[in-house]
Image (cartoon, grey):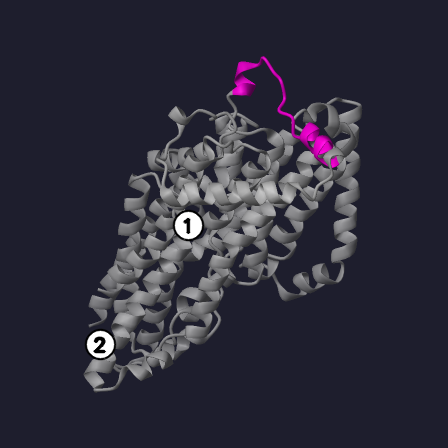
Amino acid sequence: MEIVYSVLVVFLGLLAISDLVVGVSNDAANFMNSAIGSKAAPYKIIMIVVSLGIIIGATFSSGMMEIARSGIFHPEKFFFMEVMVIFIAVMMADVILLDIFNTFGLPTSTTVSIIFDLLGAAVGVTLFKLLQDGSGLDDMASYINTGKSLAIVSGILVSVVVAFGAGTFIQYLVRIFFTFNYQKTYRYFGAVFGGISIVSILYFMVMKGLKGASFMRPEYIEWINLHSLEILLTIFIGFSLIFQVLILWFRTNIFPFLILAGTFALAFAFAGNDLVNFIGVPLAGWDSFKLWVAGGIPADAFSMEGLNESIKTPTYVLLFAGIVMALTLWISKKARKVVNTSINLSDQSRQSVEKEQFESSVLARAVVRTGIQLGNSASYFIPSAVKKILNKRFRPKVTRNQEELNLPFDQVRATVNLVVSSVLIASATSLQLPLSTTYVTFMVAMGSSLSDRAWDRETAVFRISGVITVIGGWFFTAFSAFTVAFL
């Protein structure tokens, strides 16, 4: 029987590569749309930055691999043969579903997909075991890690609200300071804003994420934790001074640099949080196979309690996965299609109904009416002088530059999208919580575009229809993933 399971492990490895390809094609919009939409740099430069972020960030994802091993089900309740059935079903269902979404250009959540794949397959095998043993369905809870599963799903749903709220609030404040004519105002606020952005990125991306890195030693992490405040203050002061010199003396626009830094950080955070979605299950299958071979017990009698033990994923495996994802971005046409969907929904210049990608719906119209009514009610409590000042700060920039007019959004909003998204995702990764990067980046972009008044009364209905369509696709992903993996 060992040869049979050896073949299955190899098959899991091939499915892992396929899942990396279709997964990163779907998630490409998460970390590329802001940089491409703002045209902060040539496309090839953006791709190089993204590729480096993914490859390096992959080495920080080792701690997240525990989710696939014991986060959804209790492995000690299953035998090796049953665990392999779960893992094969999960990977086959995941590759098929993600490729379908990529074909239609819809950004869905790879985290939701893998979580509900694991849940569906585990429930299917558990039900089979209970029927064989003549046990009741009441025993189902002892096989499924319901507490962790509910925490993960709840965290994903809460992230929708948090990401949208954070994107809306932070973009509103930033726009008040910079206005749309940011070239004149950022000389006063740009250096401090840049320093805060860089510190936020480094703190959550590197300092909070080091404990998940496959190459870090405990003594290094302890030293960094003890000196966190000094490190952050030094970075903030240093970058703020450098930016101020560049702005005042050399008249340099620092936003392209911030956008590229944020793009790198978001690609880094994506690889750190989402790599488990693609290779976590195959690695768990490989670990299970090694435990079974060492145990010398028949496959239908060997308990998989060993999967509860924490194991560091080899760095070379993580690097290989990162390289595969980076190469996929360069050659995948489906990745560009998904990117275009997200950019179009945030587009500042798409102010005509004819350009909108989604149709109107009853629910979207109801949301718009409710939003207008709430906005009108709230405006009564704001003094006229304050409203006049705020409207002046949000006055669109008048420009004759056709290239700038065609930009989906400016560099200020692109920076906010990237920094806020990367901070939220990296903080979840440091807590070993598999957050949906699609949920976070998409809703941050929607919130920031709403703050920038990119949604007028005519096009708001169509944009909300688009948001509802994409979010509905995520919930459809959960249902489909659970059903297909279960079957």
Quarter of the image with the C terminus in it? bottom left
Q: Residue furthest top?
A: 400
Q: In the image, what residue occupies the spot 54% across and 55% down?
A: 60
Q: Secondary structure at mark 2?
A: helix
Task: For label 1, count other residues whose C-alpha is less than 10 Å away and answer few (under 14), some (14-19) or many (20+).
Answer: many
* In the displayed structure image, the side of residue 222 where residue 105 appears, left or right: left
The amino acid sitting under disc 2 is Phe
Q: Nearer the viewer, residue 252 or 218?
A: 252
Residue indicated by mark 2:
128
Quarter of the image with the N terminus in it? bottom left
Q: In the image, what residue occupies the spot 79% across and 54% down?
A: 230
* In the displayed structure image, the side of residue 251 where residue 303 appears, left or right: left
The amino acid sitting under disc 1 is Ala
Q: Is residue 394 magenta?
A: yes
Q: Nearer the viewer, residue 104 or 56?
A: 104
Q: Any mark on residue 321, and which?
A: 1
The answer to whether residue 462 is seen in the rendering is: yes
Give x and y (percent) for residue 217.
Answer: 62, 63
Answer above or below: position of 166 versus 398: below
Determine the image quadrant of residue 85: bottom left
* In the displayed structure image, the side of residue 373 where residue 111 appears, left or right: left
Answer above or below: position of 447 versus 293: above
Q: How far, Cα to Cα, is label 1 from label 2?
A: 34 Å
Region in magenta:
386-405
Give x and y (percent) for residue 348.
Answer: 52, 28
Answer above or below: position of 12 versus 263: below
Give x and y (percent) for residue 391.
Answer: 67, 30
Give x and y (percent) for residue 178.
Answer: 70, 31
Q: In the image, what residue occupies the spot 69% across and 64% down?
A: 222
Q: Is residue 371 magenta?
A: no
Q: Nearer the viewer, residue 13 or 419?
A: 419
